[in-house]
Amino acid sequence: MKGFVPTPPTMVDAMVAKLFRDGPPRPESRVLDPGCGTGAFVDGVVRWCSRHGASVPRILGIESDPRHLLEARERFGHLKSVTLVNEDFLSSRSQKFDYIIGNPPYVPITALSHIERSAYRELFATARGRFDLYLLFFEQALKLLAPGGRLVFITPEKFLYVHTAERLRRILAKLALEEIHFVSETTFGPLVTYPTVTTIVGAPAKTETKVIFRDGSTRRVRLAADGSSWLPTVFGSAADPPGHSLADVSLRISCGVATGADKIYVAKAAHLTTQLKRFAFPTVAGREISPVRGLTLSHAMLLPYARSGELLAEEELGELGAYLGQPERRDKLLNRTCVARKRWYAFHENPPLGDILRPKILCKDIALRPFFLVDDVGEIVPRHSVYYIVPKETSHLQGLCAYLNSPAARAWLTANCQRAANGFLRLQSHVLKRMPVPTDFARAPQVAGSAADAARLSG
């Protein structure tokens, strides 16, 4: 099976303990391990039963990779209660199980063939957008969970908040989601997946869900049933207040320019010739934005575009055309995927320079504590690791930036942003657009708040 990652024995034991939390299985109980690999969870169930003096229940392990299955059969073939089959778990099946436990494969849509994608979209409600295979495993397993049964899965935590998992959240919200346990980022060694162990009971949702955080703290929450992100609720944030969002007061909220070849288009500003400087704009990457040092503007981006955003004709490039056309550079530009539909010197994405070359607010895409800085001249071209916010009213620029750096705004971002490694937050345009802002920023410029007003409004 694509996406196979062995689960460490200590995590297996912790998950089996959650599976049998309400008592040991009976000999006739049916246990399913979908995508069983080499049998880590089969071993965990057998080990738990041995430690607790319980009979081993009937265990079915399903694995599509015959190599893994061969190893599992060598380990457990002597146990009459264990059945291991070489099948695709996502194929049609109807047998119900009292217990389901596993580590579904993490396989993005990009690793699936077009035939697989089409087939899965017909079979699964969760196969929408840029889905991952573990979402489908979740849906399939829930279909096979017997009334009153228990399911324990370890998966990436992203299903709690990404838009792609909206349908899965709707399905889960109808069941008794007993526990969400954020486990250590180092669970799978160097493979950082931000894992979460989810425990579900095959019964209608009636009670709150227990959340266990990575620092050991806990809380009980009632999760939304409409498919919206669960992250704000999980982290104790109140619902967004009625009123205006950052999108309402902005012309554009977006990540920076993707050239597809920064090593060619981005250069040290001091090294540019006079002829090239007329195509150059100061540029900044996420690593060049600091709350202490501010913006480090030592580099420039060479733009084969007019200020309006239109791609220049090749004969208009002059010295830039000669620079880009140097054989080694041209060969690299021609190897980009975007060249199939664009001119050889165009960027991977057409830059909306009409919006970018305005006074704006900048922030890095990943930060331990999000912070925002102002480009008040409007000449900086942000790279792809930077987000930029262009207010509808330039007079709001400083005040809006002050609000975004306020404790209230940071608390909202902490509750709503996707997690990255080591406690860092990943900012995304669809999250920033939802961010509530004080009403003053939606009013006419003459009554817009100053930086001091914004600080006051943020509390």
Image: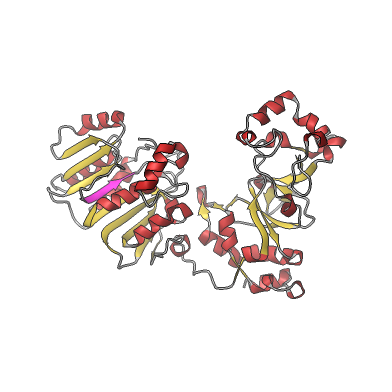
Say which quarter of the image contains residue 453. Answer: bottom right
Identify the residue at the far bottom of this view.
Answer: 447
Question: Whole-percent x and y of residue 52?
Answer: 17, 49
Closer to the camera in the image, 84 or 406 = 84
Relative to 108, does residue 252 appear above or below in the rendering? Answer: below
Asked if the magenta segment contains residue 372, the reply would be: no
Quarter containing the N terminus: top left
Question: Whole-percent x and y of residue 155?
Answer: 38, 48
Identify the residue at the far right of this view.
Answer: 274
Question: Whole-percent x and y of residue 117?
Answer: 42, 41
Say whether residue 5 is left or right of residue 315: left
The secondary structure that most of the magenta stretch takes on is: strand
Closer to the camera in the image, 322 or 458 = 322
Say whether residue 55 is left or right of residue 304: left
Decide if residue 78 is in sight here. Answer: yes
Q: In the image, what residue occupies the spot 59% across and 59% down?
A: 432
How many numbered discs sit on the rendered protein?
0
Say whether residue 213 is left or right of residue 276: left
Decide if residue 21 is in sight here. Answer: no
Say whether residue 309 is left or right of residue 147: right
Quarter containing the C terminus: bottom right
Q: In the image, what residue occupies the spot 35% across and 62% down?
A: 173
Identify the residue at the far top of this view.
Answer: 327
Question: Whole-percent x and y of residue 293?
Answer: 72, 51
Which residues are the magenta region?
Answer: 97-103
Q: What colour scheme does the image use?
A: secondary structure
